[in-house]
Image: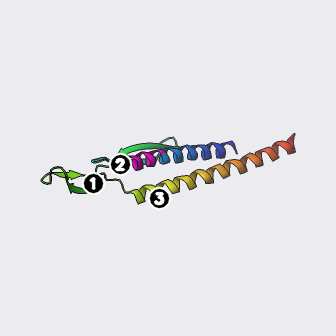
Amino acid sequence: MIAGIASALSAIQIGGKILSGGAHNIANGQTEGFKRTRVLPVESLSGGITVTLDKDVRSGPQFFSKVDPSRLREGSNVDLGEEIISNLQAVNQIETNIASVRIQDKVLGSLLDITG
């Protein structure tokens, strides 16, 4: 029972990190030359999950400078649609695991009432 709560709390933390990374990307999505940060959950050797941050090196869209039309510039490689979907999935993950913790807490409380 306690292991299930610990697992759900870990998933809530990972969801929070995914939301944080998405917020960072959305906030900087209009910055010229910005490269998005990918938040990747990775299974660790000990059996848990850790989060790694990875810079997406793909180039952004190219455009000509308004000040100097002969100069080519690069925009951000952030896809706002992709970021919003990722954030919604993270919110769902967090909400699901919060519900799991609540249910496990109720069950544990009932078991303690029975044995007490």
Q: Earlier in the sequence, mark 1 or mark 3?
A: 1
Say whether marks 1 and 3 touch (CB < 8 Å): no
What separation in Å lies between label 3 and label 2 (alpha carbons)?
15 Å
Q: In the visual, does 33 lie left or right of 53?
A: left
Q: Residue furthest left?
A: 70
Q: Residues within 10 Å of mark 2 (few under 14, many from 20)?
A: many
Q: Does residue 84 appear in the picture of this structure?
A: yes
Question: Which secondary structure, mark 2?
Answer: loop
Residue 105, percent from left and from top: 73, 45
Give the residue pinned by disc 1.
60
Residue 45, percent from left and from top: 47, 42
Give the residue pinned by disc 3.
85
What separation in Å lies between label 2 and label 1 (alpha carbons)?
10 Å
Q: Residues within 10 Å of mark 3 (few under 14, many from 20)?
A: few
The magenta segment: 20-28
Question: Which secondary structure, mark 3?
Answer: helix
Q: Which mark, residue 33?
A: none
Give the residue pinned by disc 2.
36
Q: In the visual, does 4 lie left or right of 47?
A: right
What separation in Å lies between label 1 and label 3 (alpha carbons)?
20 Å
Magenta span contains residue 25:
yes
Dominant SS of magenta comes to helix
Please say if 55 is above or below 83: above
Question: Which secondary structure, mark 1?
Answer: loop
Name the kind of residue labelled 2 in the image: Arg
Q: Residue at x 58, y 50 (%)?
A: 94
- The image's colour scheme reads rainbow
Q: Earlier in the sequence, mark 3 or mark 2?
A: 2
Name the kind of residue labelled 1 in the image: Gly
Name the kind of residue labelled 3 in the image: Ile
